[in-house]
Image (cartoon, rainbow, N blue to C red):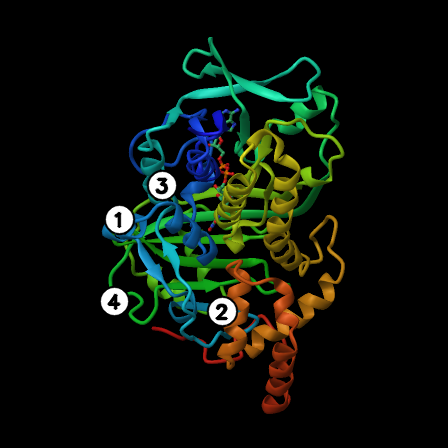
Amino acid sequence: MKMNQHAVVIGGSMAGLLTARVLSDHFAQVTIIERDPVQDQPESRKGQPQTRHLHALLSSGFEIVSRLFPGIEEDLVAGGAMVSDPGAEMCYFQFGGWKKPFDSGMRECLSSRPYLEWQVRRRVVALPNVRLLAPREVKTLLTNEDDSRVVGAEIVYRADGRHEESLVADLVVDCAGRGSATPKWLDEWGYGRAPESRVKINFAYSTRIYRRKATDLPNAKTIMIAPTPPAKSGTFIFPIEGDRWIVTSGGMHGVEPPTDEAGFLEYIRNLPVPDIYNIISRAEPLSDIVPHKFPFSLRRHYEKMKRFPAGLLVLGDAAASFNPIYGQGMSAAAMQAAALQKLLQEQGNAPTLYRRYFKQAAKIVDMPWQIAVGEDFRWAETEGPKPPGTDLLNRYTAYLNRVMEDDAVVGEQFLRVVHLVAAPSSLMSPRMLWRAWRWQRQQGKDTAVTSQPVTKPVRQN
Ligand SMILES: Cc1cc2nc3c(=O)[nH]c(=O)nc-3n(C[C@H](O)[C@H](O)[C@H](O)COP(=O)(O)OP(=O)(O)OC[C@H]3O[C@@H](n4cnc5c(N)ncnc54)[C@H](O)[C@@H]3O)c2cc1C
């Protein structure tokens, strides 16, 4: 007998699916409400247009997804996804140099986002106590008489907009993404709005899919040419199922990668190293060039609210979404879902765990937020609340980037931070500081931080 009867999850994208999986162990029935029509196939839907762009599932997220869905890795790989060691198989260029490769023991999942999500979704909807209602939209939430508790959701059928039903629930989890209506609902019920942090970056993506040949990049799996200030452009190439490459170019603060063929190629040709250009200038394009804009990172601090209704939680992009270049959104959502799972195992009574949940979720979000927002403040145009110590940390990590050209131990710790496995503060340990100091002694004068290549310009091909 499960302690709680019914949970409603708003949104059937990655955060909603992972949350539903976790709730299914603790609720007799879980209902996911998704606004878009959903087919049993890999697809990018209107409500999550970002899924047409490159999506890495970092080591931290992949570990949780694999634990929640035993056997998923085998199915992902059977369908053409790759599992890769990012230390050994990613060619990473920034601050003027390629980083030294090393075996990290970490594993990330390389596939298209629609394919990954479909593999997760089919497992979630196969659970006997989970149902996905789509296309349905949560219009509003139902509360008790004094609005102290959320008791369900009112949903409409999207196809005709007619009122459909009121669902009674012990718990509603808002996984509706950045457009979440929880701030508005809380305001209407008299709680005020959660304090928000916004950091303006004006990020623009352009993405194209190409046919991939095994000979394109024989000694590695991915290439990442990340922007180094003051330059604002970068590009990633990443293998996805179906022997394809996904190539995503990004630009910040008004630099927009073009969406026409000649402009897109030229943008990539102008990067400090030619490795991605060399591959795609010879490869067959399989898609249009698709744009996406991401104006600002956004964090809603529910942990700081003095009052909050029982029976409601917020998870995933609905709570915090950060510059996507660091590839952390799905992993941060998975970590939040894992924290919820642990709390449910400890506390059981779902409606009242919101305070503990938001406290833990805030700690989880601190990590990707600090990394993404901290990095974004390398550019003078970035606007918003700057975490204390950011400039100093950025100077130090830019320097560590140079050290990583030669020192795999520093490279590994850096990667652990980027993959949300270790805290950013671990880069300041005496061991790291000593290695950085030693590197400078060994190098003599050539330790400048620069955006142009200062080491061997082509690493892999
Ligand atoms: C360009 C780009 C690239 C990215 N790359 C990466 C990456 O490499 N790695 C990574 O981990 N993350 C990446 N992310 C972030 C990642 O896409 C999100 O963190 C992830 O999708 C989790 O989001 P979510 O499920 O919280 O919200 P979303 O994916 O935004 O989904 C919200 C869902 O809720 C539904 N919905 C909204 N309102 C309602 C309603 N009222 N009723 C019913 N349904 C509703 C929507 O239709 C949608 O399906 C990237 C993001 C962007 C913008």
Given this view, does label 2 or label 1 mark the residue nearer the observer?
Answer: 1
Circle 4 residue: 215
Q: Earlier in the sequence, mark 2 or mark 1?
A: 1
Task: Tell which circle, 4 or 2, labels the residue nearer the N-terminal end.
Answer: 2
Q: Quadrant of the N terminus?
A: top left
How many numbered marks appear?
Answer: 4
What amino acid does circle 2 point to?
Phe
Q: Amino acid at mark 1?
A: Asp
- Distance between mark 4 and mark 2 Cα atoms: 21 Å
**What secondary structure is found at the residue carrying circle 3?**
helix
Q: Earlier in the sequence, mark 4 or mark 1?
A: 1
Q: Position of residue 343 (x, y in %)?
A: 55, 42
How far separated are the C-alphas under marks 4 and 1?
Answer: 25 Å
Q: Nearer the viewer, mark 2 or mark 3?
A: 3
Residue drawn at the location 26% of the way across and 48% of the way down: 75
Sequence-first tag of 3 and 1: 1
Estimate the x, y position of residue 352 in percent, counting from the top left. Answer: 62, 31
Q: Nearer the viewer, residue 49 or 290?
A: 49
| In-image side of 181 versus 269 (left or right) | right
Q: Residues within 10 Å of mark 4 (few under 14, many from 20)?
A: few
138 up-or-down from 390: above or below: above
Which mark, by number, is residue 120? 3
Is 294 situated above or below 378? above
